[in-house]
Amino acid sequence: MRNFLVSNARFWMDLFHLDGIRVDAVASMLYLDYSREDGEWIPNQYGGRENIEAIELLRYVNSLIHLEFPGVLTFAEESTAWGGVSKAVEENGLGFDFKWNMGWMNDTLSYMEKDSIYRAYHHDQLTFSLVYAFSEHFILPFSHDEVVHLKGSMIKKMPGDDWQKFANLRLLYAYMFAHPGKKLLFMGGEFGQWEEWNEAKSLDWHLADFDRHKGVSDTVSQLNKVYKEETALHQVDNSWEGFEWIDLHNRDQSILSFVRYNADRSEHIACAFNFTPAPHKGYWMGVPEPTTYKEILNTDHSKLHGSGIVNPRAKKAKKGDCQGRAQYIEIDLPPLGAVFFKAK
């Protein structure tokens, strides 16, 4: 059985040249008592609940794949607090390159599905992920599991009328791209397909011809471009060195803001998110440096079929204590929108 499973993993890389492989439901392999009642499982030789043989198999498969297929990535869909899932085998980890951040996914979608009037009471669902964001090398997953079995498509999960649904979805994707961790978005979500994913038919590509759907796909395109070009958004995902809160306490207005830094802190991006339909003109946001900031992304831009509340001119930082900073910029924060600013 061991040889069969190992050969199965090698098969995909050797013959089909896949770039990566995901192991599903890793938690069910790690624990002998997973989904079992008392008396339905036998402890290991040390009296514990860990499945020692399964742990060694996962370590062996990861070591083998990384040895024989350099550059191939392995991913664990693991839903518990097991430590070291994405730590090297030599460091007593399981050897996966990345772990799916199921907590972030569940909390974020639970928050976004709520009408904006109730979001103030659930602000911690957005901020809690930073308590453990750097404990593993994480993937932020909006996968097939989130858009099947009557769970609804990504756009259908969003509350409000059609305008708010699309604005919420653009905001959600911007939040994902700015949050520490690599990104995963399942097919159909990138243009706001209304129907759940169905493996028996093609995607509803015709929707991408409609303005609001095109606005979502253009948002994803812009996010990919900014993400690739701005090292602050992708170089440091696994340490506090790459992240700093600006304001995590503004639950009354459902606003979040934080800074992302690149590896040597020579560049940074200030990100602000407004999770309600109320625009905030002249909003004060603390910034790290007394310099000029230029808006590089706005999910409310008219080109993305938002309401068009943008910051077309660069913002010079003003002196003043704001959110624990010695300087701030005065911005227009759009409804259900995200804005990214880069220091010039």
Image: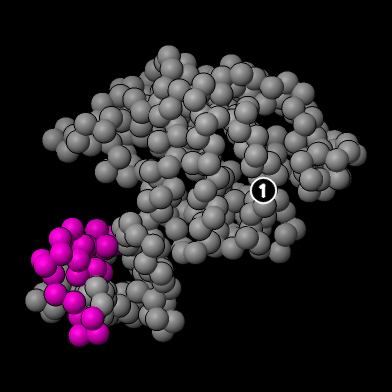
The residue lying at 77 percent from left, 31 percent from top is 284
Q: Is residue 252 left or right of residue 49?
A: right
Q: Is residue 66 left or right of residue 11?
A: right
Give the extent of the magenta segment: 20-47
The residue lying at 35 percent from left, 32 percent from top is 154
- Residue marked by disc 1: 245
Image quarter of residue 213: top left
Q: Label 1 sits on what residue type?
A: Trp
Q: Quadrant of the N terminus?
A: bottom left
* Secondary structure, magenta segment, majority class: loop
**Residue placed furthest toward the front:** 38
Q: Quadrant of the C terminus?
A: top right
Mark 1: few/some/many CA within 10 Å (<14, 14-19, 20+): some
Q: Secondary structure at mark 1?
A: strand
Front residue of 101/203: it is 101
Q: Is residue 40 magenta?
A: yes
Residue 71 is situated, as x and y percent measured from the top left of the image, at 39, 70
The residue lying at 41 percent from left, 84 percent from top is 90
Q: Is residue 262 left or right of residue 139?
A: right
Residue 174 is situated, as x and y percent measured from the top left of the image, at 53, 37
Q: How many marks?
A: 1
